[in-house]
Amino acid sequence: MIYRENGQFKTSYRADQQIFPLLQDRWFLLALLLVAFLAVPALASGYMFRAILIPFLIMSLAAIGVNILVGYCGQISLGSGAFMAVGAYGAYNFFVRVPGMPLLGALVLGGLCAMAFGILFGLPSLRVKGLYLAVATLAAQFFADWMFLRIKWLTNDSPSGSVSVSGLQVFGFPIEHSRDKYLLCLAIVCVVALLAKNMVRSAIGREWMAIRDMDVAAAVIGIRPMYAKLSAFAVSSFIIGVAGALWGFVYLGAWEPAAFSLEQSFRLLFMVIIGGMGSIMGSFIGAAFIVLLPIWLNQALPVVTGWVGLDISTAGISHAELIVFGTLIVWFLIVEPHGLARLWSTGKQKLRLWPFPH
């Protein structure tokens, strides 16, 4: 009864096309932002910031970038980990080599480096698609691993490719406490998510979706496939690069190329598939699933096995966690192949009609 549209009239096209047309959605989003910016920093513990909230926000940001390319434009990519690595190392080089380089400036420049890298490896999308494109983008992962291990200048002459950063500041305020890092990530994620949501609703977003649905028909009606595909690679790589820079600067502090392995690319792709392709909100849901579920299983499995009188070792917990995690992923894909965001939209639609049967 609280999710009705009665009395909410639209008197202009602008009001009808806004992101959140229902008043309930706008109030819910405002309440969620107030909780995230005010209540969580005051109540959450250091472990909550370091182990859950900061990884969730950064992975959500990276998943948004992957969703733009895979979900909205339909271009399969397995090089997301490489784009994150280029963004992290690009931001690192600007941060340590340019005197007085601000943190936000380094993050943006790292994203631009990832954008150029993504456009370069997005060129095969003009000729191939599907599994062939996935293999072509997979080459970016191996090339990035070789580049950051062999070209010592990129890692400030580090023999193992490991680098570290310290003394982070934003507008003169030090970013040292976990709470400060959380607020920085939250602010960046909110801004990028809003920009991405508006971009997919714009003309370029409609071009991406036309290419995804049928690229030949899109070319017939005047859409340039080269511009649409490369722009999707550029925007996606920029967002993923910023997420990679945040992952290195804020979450890890010190990292090496192995921190952005092929496993990271698959995790990001799973986030998009599970959360819902072609949905900005699905990126957040998928990131929450991938980040929070292993932590919950690690805590719950010893309790469950204790109920039946079994004693499970740490290695057994790790293996059982992977088994249960993989099983749940397959189960969710069978039950709802369109992602968890589809369940949320279906529930909202039923609430708008309840209690009427139609």
Image (tube, rainbow, N blue to C red):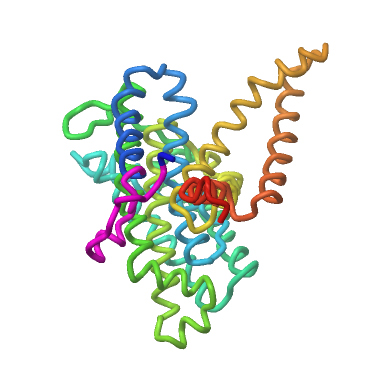
**Residue 271 lies within the magenta run:** no
Q: Position of residue 203 (x, y in %)?
A: 34, 71
Is 77 placed left or right of 235 in the picture? right
Q: Is residue 23 visible?
A: yes
Q: In this orientation, which residue lies closer to the viewer: 313 or 358?
A: 358
Q: Which residues are magenta?
A: 3-24
Secondary structure that dominates the magenta span? loop
> Residue at horizontal 48%, vertical 28%?
52
As drawn, which residue projects farthest toward the bottom?
Answer: 220
Q: In this orientation, which residue lies closer to the viewer: 143 or 261?
A: 261
Q: Is residue 110 visible?
A: no
Q: Is residue 155 above or below residue 195?
A: above
Which quarter of the rendered picture does the N terminus lie within? top left
> Residue at horizontal 30%, vertical 61%?
16
Q: Position of residue 339 (x, y in %)?
A: 58, 51
Q: In this orientation, which residue lies closer to the viewer: 59 or 272?
A: 272
As drawn, which residue projects farthest toward the right?
Answer: 309
**Residue 5 lies within the magenta run:** yes
Q: Position of residue 175 (x, y in %)?
A: 28, 27
Q: Is residue 114 above or below residue 299?
A: below
Is 193 placed left or right of 260 in the picture? left
Q: Is residue 211 above or below residue 338?
A: below
> Residue at horizontal 66%, vertical 21%?
300
Q: Position of residue 31 (x, y in %)?
A: 32, 33
As drawn, which residue projects farthest toward the front?
Answer: 356
